[in-house]
Amino acid sequence: MKRRKFIYQTSLGLGGLVPLANQLSALDINIGPYLATGIKIGEVTASEAIVWVRLTKDTKPVPKTAPIPQFVYLDEANGEWHPVAYFKEKYKQDRPDRETKAVFPDRYTVNTIEGAVPGTNGDIRILYRKKGESKWNNTDWKTVDPAADFCTQVKLKGLQAGTDYDIKVEVKSSSSKNATNSLMGSFATASLSTISKDVHFMVTTCHEYDDQDDRNGMGFKIYKHMQMLQPDFMVHTGDVVYYDQKAKDIPLAHWHWQRMFGLEGCKEFYKQVPTYFMKDDHDTWMNDCDPQTKTRFMGKLTFEQGVKIFSEQVPMSEKPFRTFRWGKDLQIWLPEGREYRSKNNSKDGPDKSIWGKEQMQWFKDSFNASDATYKIIVSATPIVGPDRPQKNDNHANSGFAYEGAEIRKFIAGYKNVYVICGDRHWQYASKDKKTGLMEFACGPASDEHAGGWKKEDILPEHRYLNIVGGFLGVQIKPGKEKTAITFTHYSVDGKKLHVEDFTNEA
């Protein structure tokens, strides 16, 4: 499937007779609103897609030369405010449960710190057409939501299955009649469930803004290398941003999304590769969080606010747990791992759950009903592992061992089933000793963010282990007799590190 590169297109209507010199001057004046945080295309099916748009006041983020706030916490013992390093050294607390505040440099606000991309009011509409056609279809104009950091989402319906589409997002101020700026993009719809067709997708996780490895405003190396492989779609398993240390209220949480998607590499990738977004702990609220977590560490930002912000910042269906079919040979499941979970440190047993009863029943019913050749569960956290014993928030360890065993036993009863997980800062391929279930961990977005496991600590379950950043590629190729599936771990530079090939069992 051929991917296309596009550039911003700007139109400015000039009325009346204007002297030539004045015309040239006027044409140099660019009129907002703008699209400095790009667009995102997601939730793609055989007939629908959601396009996410955010309007911005400026054409680009505040440069990296600008400062950011200092985040300090109160030591009640002496009434003094200190950064996290003080509490790590004195109290061994890296996330102190203490009163916190952001201290901005003089004359700076959340809209003028490094990476900020302030939003603005205005209207958007989507023009879309099949690749190669000249006539555009268009949606109605829609006003962005200031309460959602000037974001909105538009669902495109009635699309043709297995088809390449071009889109153009047009924007204008509410007082204007015509579009003043636009941004081109593209995507392809999924094939019908009766059609066997090659499918190629990527999986990524853990994009820590401070651990970028592609400089000059591009962000992460993996984006250009994934895009060169021309995937049909990507799954982002979560930790899209990291709130913990620097998001102490809603405006600062919005700032995290602005600076991440203001990166040029992100803007280029997401306008051309449809993505299914999942959330995990750091882009919901804080490390290992559950809805019952109580702490002053996150300041005014609450778990509930984090859930709402995520649904506003990415293309998202009504339910956070979803399944998508890509032709006859692939169906993926994207379970939700934060909103429904029991308290992490409660006693394990049949009543302790990450998925919750409704989601578990949905999963079993939809999984049983699927006739896809390959079934893949993409989980924000490990289901098979092995994982670090001190972690207590996933199905691979003792914290949720009962439900983990239930899930593994259930899906191992089906053929051609695999698990992909995010969240872990190392790559691995492992095989469950009891059920034989295979799990592939995609690894973090950069080598700078890799860690958490020792490279020499290879366990019997491991078929591959590497403490690096990168991404995972999955490719399905139908054949006359057998359909092959290939899992490939890539480095941050797009080099193949490990390959596993399988063919479907009858």
Image: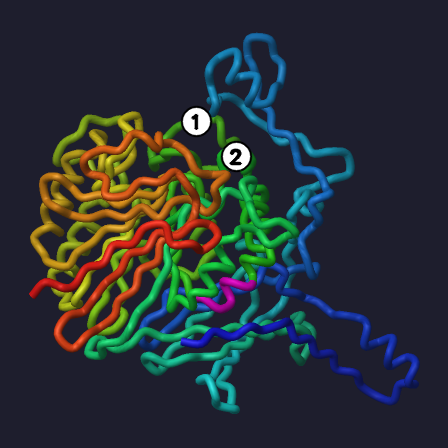
Range of the magenta residues? 268-273
Q: Is residue 340 visible?
A: no
Which residue occupies 54% across, 41% down? 211
The residue that disc 2 covers is 300
Q: Position of residue 15 (x, y in %)?
A: 80, 86
Label 2: how many Cα within 10 Å (few below 14, some 14–19, many 20+)? some
Q: Is residue 433 above or below residue 414?
A: above
- Residue 269's disc number: none
Say whether residue 9 is magenta.
no
Q: Give the colour scheme shown.
A: rainbow
Which residue occupies 32% across, 30% down? 456
The reply to whether dot 2 and dot 1 touch (C-beta < 8 Å) is no
Q: Nearer the viewer, residue 353 or 486?
A: 486
- Residue 295's disc number: 1
- Which of disc 1 and disc 2 is earlier in sequence? 1
Which residue occupies 61% across, 12% down? 79
Classify mark 1: helix, strand or loop. loop
**In this picture, residue 128 sits left or right of residue 357:** right
